[in-house]
Image (cartoon, coloured by chain):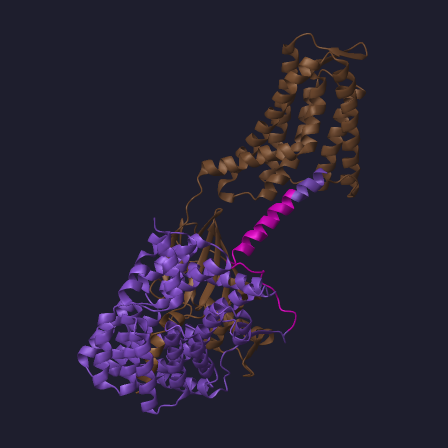
Amino acid sequence: MRAALIAVMLALAAQDALAHKPSDSYLAISVEGTAVSGQWDIALRDLDFAIGLDDNGDGEITWGEVRAHQADIVAYSLARLKLRAGGADCPVHATDFLADDHSDGAYSVMRFEGACKVDAGAIEIAYSLFADLDPQHKGLLRLEHGGGTRTGIFSPERATQSFELEKISALTQFFDYAREGVWHIWIGFDHILFLLSLLLPAVLAFGGGRWSAVERFAPAFWDVFKIVTSFTVAHSITLSLAALGVIALPSRLVESAIATSVVLAALNNVFPLVHGRRWMVAFFFGLVHGFGFASVLRDLGLPQNALLIALVGFNLGVEVGQLAIVSAFLPVAYLLRATWFYRRLVFFGGSLAIAVVAGIWLVERAFNMKIITP
Amino acid sequence: MSTTRTYTIGTVTRALRVLALATLALAAHAAPYVPKDDSVVLEHLPVRPSDPVARELRTLRAELAANPLGRDTAVRLAERYFALANAEGDPRYVGYAQAALKPWWDMAAPPLDALVMRAILKQYSHDFNGAMQDLKAATREDAGNARAWSWRAAIDMVQADYEQARKDCLALQDVASDLYAAGCLAYLDGTTGKAAAAYRSLSEAFARSGDDSPEMKVWVLTRLAEMSLRMGNAKQAERHFRAAYLEPINDQFLLGAYSDFLLDQGRPGEVIPLLVDWLKSDILLLRLAIAEKALKAPKANEHIEALRSRFEAAALRGDKLHQQEEARFNLTLVGNKEKALALAQENWKLQREPRDARILLEAALAMKNPDAAKDALEWLDRTGHEDPGLRATAQKLRALKP
C-alpha cells in the first residue's frame, strides 16, 4: 500500500522526473548522387543494455571493451538501419570506428559509406534501433544533400521515413560555378598579370624602335578584343579537355608554365620581340592557363551528373571576370596613354615589376620553394 | 603564389568537405576521437552488473523473454524500471518499462494491473490526457484501486483542477489508510492557501501512522518543509529539509527543493556540496550552475554550456518536457528574458504547479509584461496560494499595471 503514496509523491513531483536526457542516437547521412556516407553516434549506455559491453562487470566501460565489441556494435546497428532508393537497398558498410562525448555521456561513433543503385530522387530510411528495448528512444537524423540540410526524428511510431532529394536546379548549379569562375579570376593574380601584360601595350604603337601613343580608340579596342578573344578561346579548349579528363598534365608543370608566360609577356613589353601579333601569344599561352583553370575546377568537385553545366558555368564566370578587368583597364589606359606616367611608370615600370614577380613565382613553382608566398 | 593559391583553394575545398562531415555530427562538441589506449574509461554505468537490483532485473527480463505474454512478470519488471527511473531520473528506464508492457500498450482495454502501469508511464512522458483516460477506466473497473486514485489526484493537481483533485483524495479515504488520504488532502490544501492546517494534519497523520520508512519520511518532511515556507517560516522549513536530507536515501526532488530554498535564502555556497555528484541530472545541474554563477565559481560556464547543449538536444528531439527548467535557465543563467517568458507561458499550458507559476511570474516581471502572467496571477487569486516569494513577485507585477 505504501507504493500508492509513493506513487502520489512521485506524481506530485512529476515535472521533476525527467532529469536526464533521454536516449537518442545521432544519425548524419549525406547523399550525393548515388553515393551515401554518414556518421552514427550511439550512446554506450544504450549499447551496453542491448548487447552488453561491460565484460569485466566493474560498472565502467573502457575503450578496450568497446573495441572488443566493435564488430557486434556495427552488425547490431547496421541491421537496424535500412536505406533504400528507387525500390532497391543501398547497402552501407562501416569505415571508421571512434568515440565521442556528448552532453550526456560517451557515444560510439561509426562512420559508414555505401551506394544506392539508382539516383532516384528520394531516399527511404528505415530506423529501428532499440525499438524493441526502449520505445522512447529516438534517432535524430540530419540529412545532407546538395548543400541543403534536413532533419528528422525517428521513433517506433515513425520508423520509416522518405525524404525527397530535391534536385538542385541546373540554373542554380550554373550560377554557382559561374560565381566560382569570377572569383578565381579575381583572386588569380597570375592570370590578371598575364592579361595586363598583353593589354598594357594596346594603347601604344611600336614603330622605329620606340613606343608611341595610338591616335584613335578603335585600333586599341580591336587589339584588346583580339587578345581577349584568343586568350578565351584557347583556355576554354584546354579547360574543357582537362576537365573532361582527355588530357592531364602535372600541376607543377602547368603552374610553372603559367609563371613563364607572365614573365615572357611582361618582358616583351620592355624588350619588344613580338608586337602586332600579340593575340597569337595570348592564344598560345591561353592554352597553358586553361590547364590551370581546370585544376581549380577539379578541386571544386565536378558533379558527374552536371559536368557540362559546371564546365560552361565556370568558363563563362572566368570570361565575365576577365571582361570586368578589361573594361576597367581600357578606358583609363586610353586616357593616360600619352602621359609620361603611363608610358614610363605604368608601362615600363609595371611590366618590369610583373616580370620580376612572375620570375619569382617561376622559381617557386619550378623548384617547389617559398619566396614571396602570400 | 599561384601554386600556393591553387593548393589553398584545394585545401579550403577539402577542408570544407571535412568540416561538412564533421558538422554532420550534430551536437555542439568536439570531434570524434580515438581514445589514446584501451584502458581509457569512457562511461560509468549507473548500476553495476553485480548489483542486486541489476541481478533482479536480469532475472525478470530473462523470464519475460521466455514468456513475453506473462503479464505478472511484465508488470513487475515495468514496476522495477519505473522505480529506477525515479531514483536515477533517467527516462531510459521508462522506455524499458514500456517495452516490457508492449503486448498491452496499444490494447483498448488491458487487464487492470497493466492498465494502471501504462497510465503511470504515460503521465511520466506528460501524456496527461492518455494517462487520465486509462486511470478513469481503471477506477471505473475497480473503485477501490487506491493506486489509480492516487495518480488521478496527482494529475489533477499538476493541471490545477483542485475540485477534481479533492474528489480523488476523498475517494482515496475510503480505500486506503489514513496517511495516504491525509497526505493527498494536505498536499492539496498546502497548495491552495491552507498551509498551516495542512501542516498540522500531515504531521499528525504521519505521527499516527507510525510509518518510519526512509521513503515515507523524506516525502513527508519535504512536504512539511514546503508548507513551512508557504507559512513564511524559513527556520522550520530548513529543519525539515535538513532532516529529510539526512535520511539514507537519495531523492532528487528533495535535493531540488532544498537547493531552491538555499538559493532563495542567498546561500549558494551551501548548494554546491549538495549537488556536485548530480551532474547528470538536468534539474540539479541547473541549480548547481545557478549557485556557481552566484559565487562566480570557475565551473559555472562549463555547466551553463552543458545545460545549453542538453536543451538543444531536447529541442532536436522535439521534447517539450523541459520547458520550466529551460525558462529558468534562460532567465537566470543566460539573461534571455524573452525566451524565458515564452517558455514559461508554453509550460503553463501543460503544468500549473507553484513552481510553474513562479517562473511565469518572474519571467513576466523581468519583461515588465504583467499581461503575459495573467493566468498565473489569476491562479494565485483563485487558490490563495501563500508562498511569500510568489506573492511579492505578483505584487511587483501588479504595480506595473498602468
**Residue B320 x %, y %:** 38, 62
Q: Classify residue A363 by image quadrant.
A: top right
A140 lies left or right of B120: right
Vertical order, A75 against B27 (above or below): below
The colour assigned to chain B within the rendered structure? purple
Vertical order, B216 against A281 (above or below): below
Q: What residue is rendered at 43% in x and 64% in y?
A: B325
Q: Classify residue B364 by image quadrant.
A: bottom left
Q: What residue is rendered at 41% in x and 46% in y?
A: A166
B262 lies left or right of B230: right
Q: Nearer the viewer, residue A46 or B315?
A: B315
B233 lies left or right of B46: left
The colour assigned to chain A within the rendered structure? brown
- Asked if the stretch drawn in magenta spans residue B317, the answer is no
Vertical order, B399 against B283 (above or below): above
- Asked if the stretch drawn in magenta spans residue B31, the answer is yes
**Residue A226 x %, y %:** 63, 19
Q: Nearer the viewer, residue B351 or A359?
A: B351
The magenta-colored residue range is B9-37
